[in-house]
Amino acid sequence: MEIKKTYSPKEVEDKWYSYWMDNGFFAAKPNPNKEPYTIVIPPPNVTGVLHMGHMLNNTIQDVLIRKARMEGKEACWVAGTDHASIATEAKVVAMLREKGIKKSDLSRDEFLKYAWEWKEKYGGIILEQLKKLGASCDWNRTRFTMEPEMSDAVIEVFIKLYRDGLIYRGNRMVNWDPQGKTALSDEEVIHKEVNSKLYFLKYQIDGSEEYITVATTRPETILGDTAICVNPKDQRYQHLKGKKAIVPLIGRKIPVIMDEYVDMEFGTGCLKVTPAHDVNDYALGQKHGLEIIDIMNDDGTFSANAQLYIGEDRFKVRKLISKELEEKTFLLKTEDIKNSVGYSERTDAVIEPRLSLQWFVDMKKFLEKKPEALSSVMNDEIQLIPSKFKNTYRHWMENIKDWCISRQLWWGQRIPAYYLINNPSAEPVVAFTEQEALEQFQKNYSGTKASDIRQDEDVLDTWFSSWLWPISVFDGFKDPQNKDINYFYPTNDLVTAPEILFFWVARMIMAGYMFRGEIPFKKVYLTGIVRDKQGRKMSKSLGNSPDPLDLIEEYGADGVRVGMLLSSPAGNDLLFDEKLCLQGRNFTNKIHNAYNLISGWEIKEGNNEDNIAAIEWMESKFTTALIELEDNFTKYRLSDALMSVYKLVWDDFCSNYLEMIKPGFKQPIDRETYTKTINLFEKLLKVIHPFTPFISEEYWHKIKERPQNECIIIAEWPKASQTIDKQSIEHGDLAIEIVSNIRNIRNAKQIAKFDPLKLFVKNVPAELLSKFSPIIKKLACIESIETTQQPIDGASTFIIRSSEFYIPVEGSIDVEKEKENLLKQLEHKKGFLASVEKKLSNEKFVAGAPAPVIELERKKKADAEAEIQALEKSLANL
């Protein structure tokens, strides 16, 4: 049999993923004899390609779903994509532009035909990429937020909420994206600190030579000013009450109003009020009955209402108007400042506050009807992991704002509202179909024909479909009592990013209570942001984000998965370094080499009693690690869970156990030890499978002949035995330390690896010597082990816990070097003791860790204290 030196992941990954797919291992269906375990994927944008955030999020989901599947649960992971109205429309418009076609030259239906063609061609790319990662979704259940059944659900929900008085249409100040030419919700605006200028402008008081000064970052908006506002308590401006100021350049006379909203300490204490272009100014305008002058078009150019710079872009106007204001002595000075500016999440255009007629969900009224959307999280019926996000969630819910749900786009679910063309004052009719709307209009306006009505041009916010995701993926609106929704809902775990806690997670919870009367999921695992080694968020613009597919090509999917999970605690950012993937690849090579070693042994019948201690030690180490692993899974400490498995495989099994039982050169291994080793290897492959699915499946089939459909993906998850042989672990660990110390002495004294040495021991448990002496002798090349009651003069010494060890070596002992060696051991042990004491003084650790883990830490403390005492005694005797 040809043995490859290194593991080749590509051929293994392609082979097994195809096999899993072809044999339906990812498929799930209602099964009354099994407990359901359900995850719905946070649907990536249909425009998307795999990035590092997707890699982290979906690796975590796959770990959870694979473990549940092995535990015998009916594991259902639903995949799908989001139609992403703004992003997709932008992609289609760009594609058309390359073809020389303008969107404005197309009808709605013509444009949508191109959009669907684009979606069919490019829309499934990211899901195919997830398969490369090993994502074990039930691909037969893949959904798309604009497929007919899901769009019907969106329309049904809109109509229900409208009829319940929870949706309304009104003129409100919104976040306007001049590039996408659409309204955005607050959550779709990214605020960035930018370098700006503060402009100090003079406004003349009508009928006098007096001027007052106003500071603004947006001098171009003076063309929409309709008032100057000062604080009524500001003594500097009391005399201006009832007077008017003159807007520079255009000469419009505007009132000076008084309102306590104005901060007397900020700027000059005078505020220019532009109700059409600032949220707070709009509120002031409503309060004081001010005129509203909208000076901009939907693309950010200036309209005829501005009187000046008509047709020019807003940022060009800023340069032009500041120059003209300066030339005409209206600009006193400018100051460099930093301020927060809102940008569109999708197009990165600077947001323009704009008064616009839009559709809204009345979120306060919604919460009044369904207060459980807040209380369920506060009382941990829905558990946020980590729990630190509960306060953030509560703050947002208690200060919730109305949700602007209309978008000025064509790609998306069209708002089911209809209007009378020749009667703008008529109330719109919200209905499923145009025919239904027509019949409603005819009741109030006899003689109305189909040609007299029109449907709203806008579509619904993409999040208005994805907030229904856990229900709609199981057709819970189309058929509310179907088998799938009744079995798989509510789902178990949701894995997502904290930045969408509000405008996706919170809304799904609200929808769950409104439309199903229960929670949509039980736990929400919030991942951190993937950052580079310098702490910067990975992004295309910074060029600091590797291509995930390149990483998979280089290190294998298993290696990348390990690399991602090694440092990804819930809710905390992941500082990603490609070396982590190298570490992951080395881990898979370690498994590969372990298999090569074991498979290369010849087997003889019988039992080597010298290996019994090693087997018992390894079995107990496995049970201990399994208990720790389960505890970490329960607490969603997936990095810690992986690390416990990583150490178990790398250190305990490969580096120590296999060395303990390995037969001599060209010697066979006994049947009993071989069988026990294969059983241990099988259990190790099971516990690494959720993290490294491909290599575990490969060697599951290589280590033992079995029917190919008996795959590890559905193998039974190991169960921890009721008892742990603590003495076996203690003695085995001590034996390993003894061997390590002897090897260090060999290196320090330049003694050849196979030169036999004598070992004298003091205060070593007799049970350890009887069981582990053969292993110590074999691994450290010791010809004899003898007990002693007195130190051996001239011997090299080391101390482990309360046990002392002496190795006589030729030549006189260098007292200073021996002293230096003992001092190093003492310093190391004191540092170790401090770390253990710190852990035991952590109330959260002591309260949350399982009893065996606490007991182990206390044992470490006692052992370290004894070892320190022995080292200090040895130093005193030198």
Image (tube, helix red, strand yellow):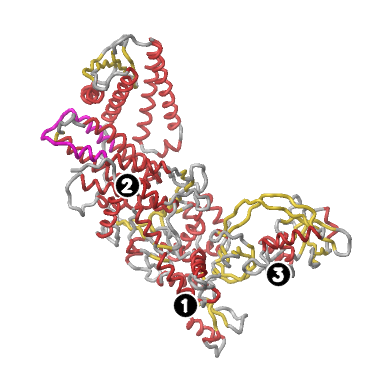
Residue 613 magenta-drawn? yes
Please say if 364 is above or below 678: below
Toward the right, the furthest residue is 208
174, 471: nearer the viewer: 174
Mark 3 vs mark 2: which is more N-terminal?
A: 3
Please give the residue where the numbered disc 2 appears in the rendered image: 692
Amino acid type of the residue tagged 2 in the rendering = Thr
- Nearer to us: label 3 or label 2: 3
Number of numbered discs on residues: 3
- As helix, strand or loop, the secondary structure at mark 2 comes to loop
Which quarter of the figure has residue 171?
A: bottom right
- As helix, strand or loop, the secondary structure at mark 3 comes to loop
CB-based contact (under 8 Å), mark 3 and mark 2? no
95, 355: nearer the viewer: 95
Q: Looking at the image, which residue is at 43% across and 37% down?
A: 845
Please give the residue where the numbered disc 1 appears in the rendered image: 432
- Quarter of the image for the N terminus: give it: top left
CB-based contact (under 8 Å), mark 3 and mark 1? no
Amino acid type of the residue tagged 1 in the rendering = Phe
Any part of residue 197 in sight = yes
Please state the extent of the stretch shown in magenta in the rendering: 593-622
Please give the residue where the numbered disc 3 appears in the rendered image: 310
Any part of residue 382 in sight = no
- As helix, strand or loop, the secondary structure at mark 1 comes to loop
CB-based contact (under 8 Å), mark 1 and mark 2? no
Amino acid type of the residue tagged 3 in the rendering = Ile
Residue 507 magenta-drawn? no
Q: Looking at the image, which residue is at 48% across and 64% down?
A: 84
